[in-house]
Image (cartoon, rainbow, N blue to C red):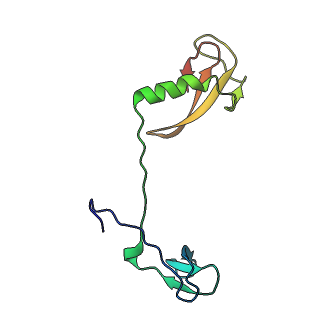
Amino acid sequence: MSSGNRAQARLFFCPETNDLLYPRENKETRKLEYYCKNCEYYTEAQTTDYCVFVQETTFSEKDKTIQLQDVISDPTLPRTKDVRCPNCDHNEAVFVSESTEAGMTLYFNCTSCRHKWR
């Protein structure tokens, strides 16, 4: 372990070919093992060898606002003419799904007045 209580990932090598060992799940035992791609050698990984990386990204309200303004001009997003804007009665909208406390929610953005609704 290094400073900051972070584990260092280690490299393992095959004792027969000196090639790098790669991780995989043994489907029968449901355990992590390292194997050689050039011979039949494999070894079960020790729990001290486990290394999980988690990247958490947070967005400020400003970032979310900028993202929503760009939604209307993005040609790769899906559009529909099956809904009417409750603000201006225009019939074309871009729709996106966003994560909310209740799960995934579908939002529509009017291509005329930029109004956003569910």
| Residue 107: image location, x then y, percent | 57, 29
**Residue 96 relative to residue 75: left or right:** left
Q: Quadrant of the N terminus?
A: bottom left
The structure residue drawn at horizontal position 65% and vertical position 12%, both measured from the top left corner, is 89
Residue 46, position as x, y percentages in the image:
41, 80
Nearer-the-camera pick, 12 or 47: 12
Furthest-top residue in view? 88
* Quarter-of-image position of residue 59: top left
Q: Residue furthest front?
A: 18
Vertical comparison of 63 with 113: above or below: below
Which residue is pictured at 55% across the width and 83% down the height? 18
Name the residue located 42 percent from the left edge and 67 percent from the top edge.
51
Q: Nearer the viewer, residue 32 or 40?
A: 40
Q: Position of residue 30 (x, y in %)?
A: 52, 77
> Which image quadrant is residue 62 in?
top left
All told, the count of numbered labels is: 0
Residue 7, given in percent of the width and then of the height, sits at: 35, 66
Q: Is residue 66 above or below residue 43?
A: above
Quarter holding the C terminus is top right
Residue 65 horizontal side relative to residue 91, left or right: left
